[in-house]
Amino acid sequence: MGQRATGGPKRVKAEAYVHAELDASGRTILRTLRSAAPITLLPRRRPESGAAVVHLVGSGAAPLGGDDLTVTVRVGPGARLRIRGVAASVALPGQHAGCSRTRLRLQVEAGGELDYQPEPTVVTARAHHQAEVVADLAGDARLRLADTVVLGRAGEASGRLDTSLRVRRDGQPMLHQEIALGDPVLDASVAVVAGRRVLVTEFRCGENDPVEAVSGDWWSLVPLAAGGSLLTVLAPDAITAARCANEARQST
């Protein structure tokens, strides 16, 4: 399932799945870990204290135009899971008509905790990529969800990017955000990304929310009406983006 033929690139539809839960001793274990090329999930041999750790690895060129890739993550009651990327994902146009799609489905049950931090997604020229995230949380679940987008490689214009982020807690909406990028005129506007190549967003829930919105040069950290917070950073490069994100986190 999901493997490209050696005779040439073909559309790939693949779904990877992670299920973390507590065992009888109170330790978080990976009950199910299912990869699907080009998505490979690798457990860390020596997990961090109290949490299971999974590395997200791209085992092939992806996503290409026409690809449809899904990662589903379930964190059981009281379990703690951390997912980390290993290398950037590069969205490429491919040989097929249509956009590439990635879907992230997250479910964190009562008392569970998920920290999801992949490496950046680079949207290359002529690519059209759609990224959708849906997270369903129990009332006392904790989630940290980070996302970094790089618009084009060095010296290259960006392709098109459409993102959608929906977060629900106990079935009630917390956040619904949609972003459309890739139009040179609009992207140059201060109402969009002001010509900056790197966009970082980070949603947090279940921690101490900032009392009020704070901001700095090209970053903001905003408490949400339904709880949780949203960090947004715009930067000319990934190093500057990381520095600004750290400055924002330390501001509270």
Image: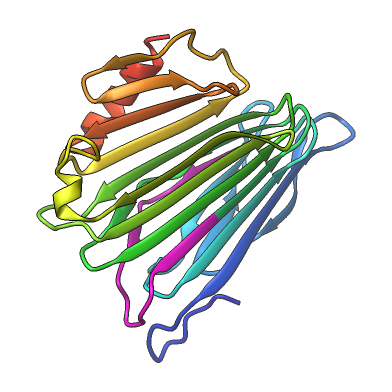
Residue under the point 33% across and 51% down:
180
What is the magenta range?
A: 81-103
In the image: residue 31, left or right of residue 42: right
Q: Residue 222: x, y in percent?
A: 43, 20
Q: Nearer the viewer, residue 234 or 14?
A: 234
Q: Is residue 35 visible?
A: no
Residue 193 painted magenta: no
In the image: residue 78, left or right of residue 70: right
Q: Residue 55: x, y in percent?
A: 53, 47
Residue under the point 24% across and 61% down:
159
Instruction: Return the residue found at the far left.
Output: 155
Quadrant assignment for the C terminus: top left
Q: Residue 52: x, y in percent?
A: 66, 37
Q: Is residue 146 above or below residue 103?
A: above
Q: Is residue 37 above or below residue 27?
A: below
Which corner quadrant of the image does residue 89 belong to? bottom left
